[in-house]
Image (spheres, grey):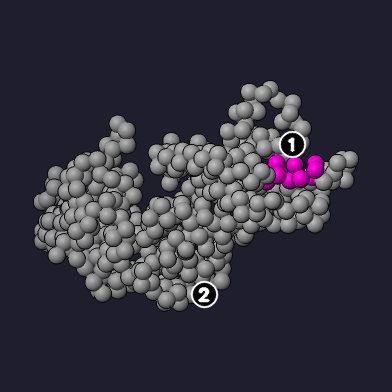
């Protein structure tokens, strides 16, 4: 009952926060639909380019709607002492965070699937060959980035810095997954190898190719690292000094 | 039966010892006031009792439970009104209560909770539009939502207007009359004196006075004050006094008897003691006497 309640609360707050919606929904959706649409019409081999750009751009939805959204929301609630108030209820710490993560995952998966349908119609991007793996990779990627976003709040000293401190993360994730077009190809090979280890790159690889085993292992390891970091360093209240 | 038991509680923040071996007990159904200046250790003690922090030394038990180690069970039976805690600013008052009802077992109906806290007329108002006092009332509504057996109130009426403060006192008395144990901290000593049946005064992290309200005050000196008659030196008076500006102040265990002695002395010399003020010890006297840091 309590997990459902925190999930419901997280979803309600997500859609009520108009300022955050611009950053968490409109920007990533605009990029994930807009970039393939652009590629479809400016490149000779438009559908192939649009398809490649769409899959790369899903890393933006994962890193913005999944990672940035939860990092900003939890940092704000921590600094406003809302998390402290939630802890004064019967909810366990796990239920508070799990509800927030589950809510973020739902919005993220919904946006990725929504973008997939949109680009099918506006940019002729074909549906994935293996839709089950696509959904599973989206779900696994969303869980992973949401857990990492929650863990990342420990590094954010004040809520005002949360959005700025997540920008490098989504830029790296976007470039690493190929969302910035040919930019990835211009980077040294060792950088590309490092980028391949990112959870967003693993999720995008699974969505694109239908391969699941190696990406699943990658996502599981990152998720585990995030959970350990939460256990060790997550702060429920702002620093006093 | 003891509802709250604190034994040798020590809490440190780095090298700073905020609470230094505090011990006290609160009986079931009692209203207990924990008093002290800012930084005396009140909020730290409440936060340990509410399970937000673990003691560095000593033990605390609330309804026989370790509030940090058995937080879930303790939360089910306690309510907490924190000195500082935020709300979701974009939710209305009614929606906030509804949300908290989802987190609370056997919660009061929303309308009852709002009526108790005097917020029924604000049900549709967003939390960000409430005044400071109204937010405290909402805080109180949330703390009492689950009909707690033990209620922790950390400065519950700060920011409230006098009417709201009296309504809160009535609510707290009503909860205690129904069997709830209440531990409150406050800077309003009149509030503590009116509400609490026992108290502890913290100073510099240690208890400097504790006991039943009536007995503790009875053991404290009362006060007789008057304007010094012209041409009279303090050492001519029959009782020792201290001068506070124009006023001579005599402290005595029995202020009525002291007043009679002074009046008889003045009558014998054809003097009048103007501005005479005789009163028993108040909590403020006790507080100022014991809390010296």
Q: Marks 1 and 2: in contact by CB < 8 Å?
A: no
> Is residue A186 shown above or below B195?
above
Q: Position of residue A161 (x, y in %)?
A: 58, 39
Which residue occupies 33% across, 70% down?
B147
Residue appearing at x 52%, y 75% in the figure:
B121
Quadrant of the image containing the C terminus of chain B? top left
Q: Mark 1 falls within which chain?
A: A
Q: Is residue A154 left or right of residue B56?
A: right
Q: Position of residue A63 (x, y in %)?
A: 62, 43
Q: Residues within 10 Å of mark 2 (few under 14, many from 20)?
A: few
Taking B249 as reference, is A222 above or below it? above
Residue stretch rendered in magenta on the structure: A48-58
Q: Which residue is mark 2?
A: B121
Mark yes or no: residue A181 visible. yes
Image point 34% across, 50% down: which residue? B52
Residue A50 counted in the magenta span:
yes
In which chain is the residue bearing label 2? B
Q: What kind of element bears circle 1?
A: loop
Q: Secondary structure at mark 2?
A: helix
Quadrant of the rendered image containing residue B106: bottom left
Residue B52 part of the magenta-drawn span: no
- CA gap, disc 2 and disc 1: 54 Å
Q: Which mark is residue A180?
A: 1
């Amino acid at each position: 009952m309590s997990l459902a309640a925190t999930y419901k609360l997280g979803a309600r707050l997500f859609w009520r926060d108009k300022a955050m919606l611009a950053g968490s929904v409109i920007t990533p959706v605009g990029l994930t639909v807009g970039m393939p649409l652009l590629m479809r019409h400016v490149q000779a081999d438009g559908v192939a380019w649009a398809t490649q750009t769409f899959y790369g751009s899903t890393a933006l939805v994962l890193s913005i709607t999944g990672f940035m959204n939860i990092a900003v929301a939890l940092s704000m609630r921590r600094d406003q002492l809302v998390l402290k108030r939630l802890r004064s209820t019967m909810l366990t710490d796990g239920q508070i965070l799990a509800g927030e993560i589950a809510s973020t995952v739902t919005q993220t998966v919904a946006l990725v699937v929504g973008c997939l349908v949109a680009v099918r119609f506006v940019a002729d991007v074909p549906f994935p060959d293996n839709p089950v793996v696509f959904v599973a990779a989206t779900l696994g990627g969303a869980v992973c980035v949401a857990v990492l976003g929650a863990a990342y709040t420990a590094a954010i000293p004040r809520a005002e810095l949360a959005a700025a401190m997540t920008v490098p993360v989504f830029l790296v994730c976007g470039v690493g997954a190929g969302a910035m077009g040919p930019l990835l190809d211009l980077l040294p090979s060792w950088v590309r190898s490092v980028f391949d280890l990112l959870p967003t790159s693993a999720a995008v690889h699974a969505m694109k190719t239908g391969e699941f085993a190696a990406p699943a292992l990658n996502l599981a390891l990152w998720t585990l690292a995030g959970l350990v970091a939460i256990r060790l360093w997550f702060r429920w209240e702002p620093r006093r000094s | 039966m003891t509802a709250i038991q604190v034994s040798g509680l020590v809490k440190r923040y780095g090298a700073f010892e905020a609470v230094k071996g505090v011990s006290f007990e609160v009986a079931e159904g009692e209203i207990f006031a924990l008093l002290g200046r800012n930084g005396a250790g009140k909020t730290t003690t409440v936060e340990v009792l509410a399970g937000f922090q673990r003691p560095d030394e000593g033990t605390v038990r609330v309804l026989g439970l370790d509030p940090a180690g058995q937080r879930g069970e303790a939360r089910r039976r306690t309510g907490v009104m924190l000195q500082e805690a935020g709300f979701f600013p974009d939710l209305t008052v009614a929606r906030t209560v509804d949300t908290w009802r989802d987190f609370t077992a056997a919660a009061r109906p929303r309308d009852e909770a709002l009526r108790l806290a005097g917020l029924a007329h604000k049900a549709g108002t967003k939390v960000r539009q409430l005044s400071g006092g109204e937010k405290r009332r909402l805080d109180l509504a949330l703390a009492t939502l689950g009909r707690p057996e033990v209620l922790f109130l950390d400065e519950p009426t700060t920011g409230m207007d006098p009417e709201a403060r009296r309504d809160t006192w009535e609510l707290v008395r009503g909860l205690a009359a129904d069997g709830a144990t209440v531990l409150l901290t406050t800077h309003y000593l009149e509030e503590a004196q009116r509400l609490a049946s026992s108290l502890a005064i913290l100073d510099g992290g240690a208890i400097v006075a504790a006991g039943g309200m009536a007995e503790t005050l009875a053991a404290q000196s009362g006060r007789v004050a008057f304007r010094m008659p012209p041409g009279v030196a303090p050492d001519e008076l029959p009782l020792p006094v201290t001068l506070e500006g124009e006023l001579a102040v005599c402290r005595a265990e029995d202020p009525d008897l002291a007043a009679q002695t002074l009046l008889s002395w003045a009558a014998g010399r054809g003097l009048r003691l103007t501005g005479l003020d005789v009163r028993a010890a108040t909590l403020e006297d006790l507080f100022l006497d014991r809390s010296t840091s």
